[in-house]
Image: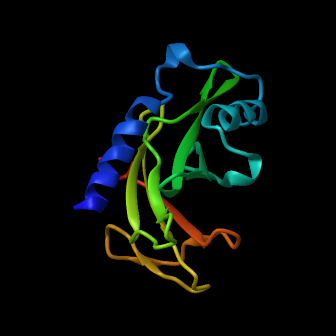
Amino acid sequence: MRYLMLVLLIIVIFSGCSLGSEDSFMWFPSPEAAIQNGIKLEGINESDLLATVETDGETLLIFKQNVPEGTIVGVASLSKKDGEFAWYRENDPVLVKHLDETASPTITCEINTQSKKIFYVYLGVTSAIENRISLKNGTKVQPTIDKNSGIYYYVESGNDEK
């Protein structure tokens, strides 16, 4: 029950943190400048950016952040408009490692980009070098594992489902 209350509290805290309205975007002439702005917006360091994943015509940015409850992982995307770029995050970060170092089981997040594309991002924490996870369709894959944090991720496009 206490764990459930903690998760609900985290959801409530982050529900106001979506960086979504196109009118509120800060546009930049390069992807690098947009990413630097996103790092500032999220209150993270460059070392917290775990990966930049190019897939299905989109750029997804996976980052971690330490919070009082443990470690959360968020996924943002780069929006593109008229040759300019902006950091976009519609979905809230998820708690993958608790403060007491216990890890959440594999978490599957549905990520929506500003261009209305859908991706499934599988997240978790492991100490094993070889850690296969099961995707929604039952396929087993080897996710990418960040050696420093043990956080793993795998990105799957959900745009073929329609």
Q: Quadrant of the N terminus?
A: bottom left
Position of 62 with respect to 18 (left or right) is right
Disc tally is 0
Q: Residue at x 52, y 13 (%)?
A: 23
Q: Residue at x 75, y 47 (%)?
A: 46
**Res. 161 in view:** no
Query: At 57% from the left edge and 43% from the top edge, which residue is drawn?
Result: 57
Q: Position of residue 95 (x, y in %)?
A: 45, 57
| Left or right for 98, reference 78 | left
Residue at 53% of width from left, 78% of height from top? 126
The x and y percentages for residue 60 are: 58, 47
**Residue 116 figure quarter:** top left
List the single residue furthest toward the top: 23
Does residue 78 appear left or right of residue 94 in this picture?
right
In percent of width and height, residue 158 lies at: 39, 52
Q: Quadrant of residue 144?
A: bottom right
Residue 4 in sight: yes
Colouring = rainbow
130 above or below 44?
below
Residue closer to the observer: 82 or 97: 97
